[in-house]
Amino acid sequence: MTSPSADVDRFVASLAHPLRDVVVALRSAILRADPRVTERIKWKAPSFGYAGDDRVTMNLHRPDQVQLVFHRGAKVRDSTGFSFDDPDGLLRWAAPDRAILTLTGPDDLATSEAAIVQLVARWLAATTD
């Protein structure tokens, strides 16, 4: 497992989100996805990638859910030829190269944690140059 970031530790410790426990468990699961995963705070939430190149970012703006935004970086990239398989149907595609996974509580995470870990690992591998 990747060593947690002190900045993200402080952020999570002070987080007043109603689904904070989901954030904590989800963060831990993502850090287990690949030993090369890095994390930092981006857009006022934990973000994960390789070597500081963000690929999966939490969205904590709504009190009733935690979202993971699967992206290919901050800038829109040409998605010609890009495809990604989501065998468990966890993702909602917001654009050809951007998808969202929504969790509404601990039960959502409990039933799909292993699939989420695999999904994150495959997304990081598929979107890293």
Image (spheres, helix red, strand yellow):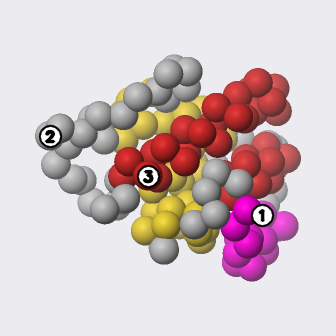
Q: Residues within 10 Å of mark 2 (few under 14, many from 20)?
A: few
Residue type, mark 3 in image: Ala
**Cβ atoms under marks 2 and 3 closer than 8 Å:** no
Give how far across and how far down residue 14 sits, in percent: 82, 67
Residue at the image position 36 percent from the left and 34 percent from the top: 84
Residue at the image position 37 percent from the left and 59 percent from the top: 128
Between 83 and 63, the one nearer to me in the picture: 83
Q: Quadrant of residue 63?
A: top right
Q: Between marks 1 and 3, how big is the CA–CA gap?
A: 26 Å
First in residue order: circle 1 vs circle 2 = 1
Residue type, mark 1 in image: Val
> Is 22 included in the stretch rendered in magenta?
no
**Cβ atoms under marks 1 and 2 closer than 8 Å:** no
Q: Between marks 1 and 2, how big is the CA–CA gap?
A: 37 Å
Q: Is residue 43 left or right of residue 12?
A: left
Give how far across and how far down residue 91 sits, in percent: 49, 29
The circle drawn on residue 80 is 2
What secondary structure is found at the residue carrying circle 3? helix
User: Which quarter of the image is occupied by the C terminus?
Assistant: bottom left
User: Which quarter of the image is occupied by the N terminus?
Assistant: bottom right
